[in-house]
Amino acid sequence: MRQGYFLMAFWCVSVLFPAASPALSLEDAVQQGLESSLNLKKSLIDLSSAEYSAKRLWAEVFPTISGTVGASYSSKLFSGDGFELDKEILNTSAGAGIVLTLNAGIPFTMKNIKLAYQTRLLNYEDARNQLEIQITKNFYSLIADRDNLASLEYMLQLAQRQYDRDQVAFRNGVIGEMTLMQSRLGLQNARYSLSAARSAYTNRMSDFFSQLGIAHDADIALEGKIQIVKIEANADNLIREYLPRRPDIISRRQEIERLENTRKQLSSSGKAPSLSARLSADWTGQGMDPFIDKLSDKLSGSASITIPIDPWLPGTSRSQSVRAAKLAVDKARLDLQSAEDAAVAQIRSLAANLRNSWDSIEIARLSVGVAERGYELTDQGFRNGTVESLKLGDARNNLINARQRLLQAELSYLNMILDISAALNINWKDLMK
């Protein structure tokens, strides 16, 4: 009898989701979602910009190059012979200059540019990972809804079968009108539950397709099922192995490094001598053809070393800037400690919840077995005339409720696996191996 129930459920799934419809697997959904995400595309633009700068660190020591071109004309206006046009008093000039400035803080500026690229890369990879986890959660939530629809369809078939039997029994005078009305009410409730679940499922599918960049009314079925295995999560081992890999922990460490480089850059550029060198060439001429017979040129160069004094004096503006940079590093270290403590607590909590959630799955599976057997015996008693129609309806409701609880328990366990994999920054499928 139980095998017949499963065959009926499989038939319902086939009716609800015909094989002719295109199928969307989890891998395809994740790939489609990653390619369609506007936030990821924006993050990739920021990453490309940071990478461009990181590959051109020489720009920090590249000299400033400039060129000038000018012309001037001078003539009396009202005095003497007044204004006159004379090409001989037209003055022209051209020049080029190179300025190079070096200070001890440049190496730390370069380090921060490379660190900015690493941070952008970390943020991009973390955003991809979080989006993949969210898509996976939505995908399997819809799989659970799909399986629930199959169960509701099966329950509708059972309710219809019971109502048909009660109609025959009523016509033969075996049961009263009230019993038939209760059976009809059960059928209508089963039909309404299925209709409401279908509507909710359709809306959620539309939202999911929109998230993936697919037409919301696309005729696409989901391919897959919820498969879970028991995971033995030792919190201490997980913390020891995976805590340093968490993106938020890495980000905090990078922030400390960035602030430390900033402090060294301010201290070095503010207190250490800086070198400035300039080389320029100028050409001047007179008349309309100045570069033929009236050309003069000049080459000049200069170099200077600037030795700052005020940063060495306590309380000055630049001295306070260096001190503030050091305090920022100290605060960042405290933020790191706080993030590590929160991460440890989160991993321990998730590991404990994972263990408890498996117990709920085992109870839910046992409840389904009890409900299935209870419905079999109640149905048999109803056919033999020893069980009332109302009790058979109650047994049917208990069965659908038990199956729904099992679906939710399995989905909740899978979501916990996804959450703990996100907390450990690893692929969730690796936890299930």
Image: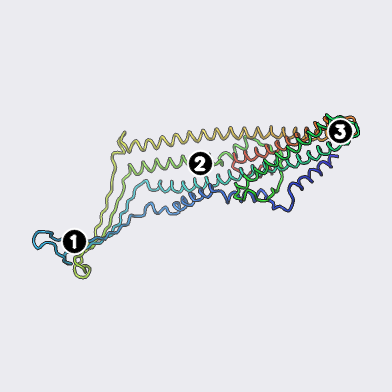
Mark 1 is on which residue type?
Tyr
Residue underneath mark 1: 73
Mark 1, residues whose alpha carbon is within 10 Å: few (<14), some, or many (≥20)? some
The spot of residue 303 in percent (x, y) is: 27, 53
Q: Earlier in the sequence, mark 3 or mark 2?
A: 2
Give the amino acid at mark 3.
Leu
Question: SS at mark 3?
Answer: helix
Q: Residue 127 sits in which quadrant? A: top right
Is 385 situated left or right of 29 in this image?
right
Q: Residue at x 44, y 34 (%)?
A: 330
CB within 8 Å, label 3 to label 2: no
Return the mark for residue 251.
2
Q: Considering the numbered disc 1 on the image, is that residue within a helix, a strand or a loop?
A: strand
What amino acid does circle 2 point to? Ser
Q: What percent of the width, then of the height, locates residue 324?
A: 38, 35
The answer to whether residue 51 of the structure is visible from this angle is yes
